[in-house]
Amino acid sequence: MKKNFMMANLFLFIVFLLSACNNTEKYQHIEVFVTQTSEQNDESLYETTGFKKVNAITTIEEGKNHIATDIKAIEDFYDVDGRYIKTEIVHSEFNRSKVTNAEDGDEHKKELQEPTTILIPDETIEHFQLENMTEEEKEKVKNHVLSFIDML
């Protein structure tokens, strides 16, 4: 009888642990924006070198004991005069344990030689962010980015 009681308590404890482990929140942001690029000069000041147009999918998963981020992006780089330089397809992952503070991550990049972002006007060289995207636009950007991430 005592053995059955202990087994039942052990079973309940395992179920409790499993349910606690599954208590994670996951967020996904799909973004279309333009931002300045800069480099540090000899005087340790940052100067604008151009801008980049970005289509990105950012996924954040947070649980009691960990946080993980996954960024998939297409970045078209331009100089300060608006001349195209290059495109980078980027997939970066980062994980951190809230228990041990251990961190790990990985990043993969591939360079292309033609503009690849979508839903950003060609003449846009200043700050831009596509606000209030429709579900159709989000799905279009997501599928577009994922199709290039598969190349990595």
Image: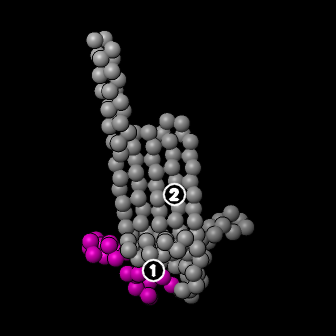
User: What amino acid is found at the position of numbered circle 2 in the picture?
Assistant: Glu
At 57% from the left and 49% from the top, the residue drawn is 104
Instruction: Report how many numbered discs are placed on residues in the image.
Output: 2
Q: Residue 91, image x and y in percent? A: 52, 65
Left or right of 10, for residue 52: right
Q: Which residue is mark 1?
A: 117
User: Could you tell me which secondary element the residue under label 2 belongs to?
Assistant: strand
Give the number of the disc on residue 93. 2
Q: Residues within 10 Å of mark 1 (few under 14, many from 20)?
A: many
Residue 135 among magenta residues: yes
The alpha-carbon separation of the residues under discs 1 and 2 comes to 21 Å
Magenta span dominant secondary structure: loop
At 36% from the left and 60% from the top, the residue drawn is 28
User: What amino acid is found at the position of numbered circle 1 in the picture?
Assistant: Thr
Up-down relation of residue 106 to residue 12 (above or below): below
* Residue 122 visible to the viewer: yes
User: Could you tell me which secondary element the residue under label 1 belongs to?
Assistant: loop
Q: Are marks 1 and 2 in contact (CB under 8 Å)?
A: no
Q: What's the magenta region? A: 115-141
The residue nearer to you, when weighing 62 against 12, is 12
Q: Residue 68, image x and y in percent? A: 46, 51
* Of callouts 1 and 2, the N-terminal one: 2
